[in-house]
Amino acid sequence: MMRTEVTYAAYLKLDDLLKLQEPRTPDDAADLTTVLSEQFFIVSHQTCELWLKQILGDLAAVEGNFLTMTTTDLERSVDLLCRAGELLRLLHEQLMALERLPLEDFVRFRQYLGTASGAQSSQSHELERVLGSASRSGSLFLAFRAGLERIGADLEEIVGAGVAAGPFHRVVEAMLRVGNGYFQWKIGHVGLVTKMIGEQSGTAGTSGVAYLMDRATMPFTELHELRGKVHERRRRQVG
Ligand code: HEM
């Protein structure tokens, strides 16, 4: 029986993928740079959504691992959390690249966006649900705490013990990296938006920069509080 060779293009479905960027700017020669800038804008958003898909998959696998809390699963979780942290760094860098979008092109094609906005990104809403915010615990942290309770481990002791807590400590550290990476991504977005629209409102009808500033909060408040308590305990011991 003949085996069909898988090609690079077939494996990655490149024919489909490379057709998915459809700038709305009328494609006449006079406007070529605007069309290219709009393509740049579309590719930036599409790649962001692809990385969000990977991040959400990785974090869902971590939540699954917290059901067992075996050493192997904890180490796998550390790897996955570190990967998610790197991907958030990448998302932040992509925003820095998008700062190279020429304003004169953006003002020309922005009218074609209508009310389309990143505020409608369901994957970004899902990421917020998983990571939480300054005022609400996310499902990732809750799954970790529930896993620790099931095996009779105490989070405050783990945070206080540092490296002596082994894989538990590494999970906490990697979660905090994800949290800070997420915050940096959000702040980077505020910087980009400020550069691109100043005080104008967003395509979704929000106040724009002011709205985004309000929403740029840091997740894992509980872990930050527990780390703060380590200072308090030290002060009591020496003082
Ligand atoms: C020139 C580039 C960009 C501009 C001017 C911009 C502008 C905005 C504005 C004004 C908002 C607030 C909602 C609204 O009223 O529309 C928003 C929200 C959002 N944007 Fe962007 N954005 C840009 C690039 C990106 C990119 C590359 C992504 C990556 C997917 C992204 C993801 C989001 C997300 C997830 C939200 C919701 C944030 C939240 O609710 O906290 N944006 N954007």
Image: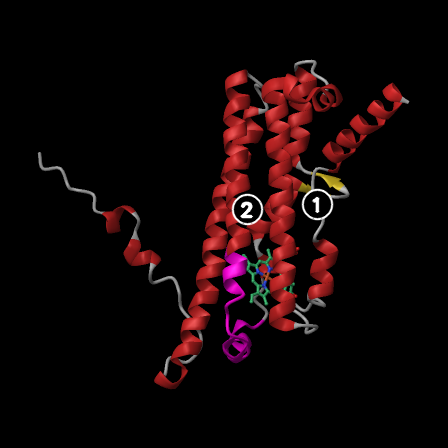
Q: Secondary structure at mark 1?
A: loop
**Residue appearing at x 34%, y 56% in the figure:** 17
| Magenta highlight: main SS | helix
- In the rendered image, the vertical position of residue 214 relative to residue 233, given as above or below: below
**The furthest residue to the bottom:** 30
* Amino acid of disc 1: Met
Marks 2 and 1, the one that precedes in the sequence = 2
Tell me if I can see residue 203 in this picture: no
Residue 34 among magenta residues:
no
| Badge 2 element | helix
Residue in view at x 48 percent, y 48 percent = 51
Q: Is 25 situated left or right of 183 in this image?
A: left
Classify 74 as above or below 190.
Answer: above
Residue on which the image places disc 2 = 88
Asked if residue 105 is among those painted magenta in the image, a careful observer would answer yes
Callout 2 touching callout 1 (CB < 8 Å): no
Label 2 CB sits under 8 Å from any ligand 1 atom: no
Q: Quadrant of residue 198?
A: bottom right
Q: What amino acid type is highlighted by mark number 2?
A: Leu
The percent coordinates of residue 82 (x first, y second) are 53, 35
Seen from the viewer's position, the closer of residues 186 and 20 is 186
For the question of whether residue 15 can be seen, the reply is yes
The spot of residue 46 in percent (x, y) is 46, 57
Q: Position of residue 226 (x, y in %)?
A: 77, 29
The quadrant of the rendered image in which ligand 1 is seen is bottom right
Check the picture and name the quadrant holding the C terminus: top right
Q: Which residues are magenta?
A: 94-114
Q: From the image, tell me which residue sits under label 1.
A: 218
| Residue sitting at x 79%, y 32% | 228
Residue that sits furthest to the left in the current view: 1
**Relative to 56, is 150 on the left or the right?**
right
Q: Quadrant of the N terminus?
A: top left
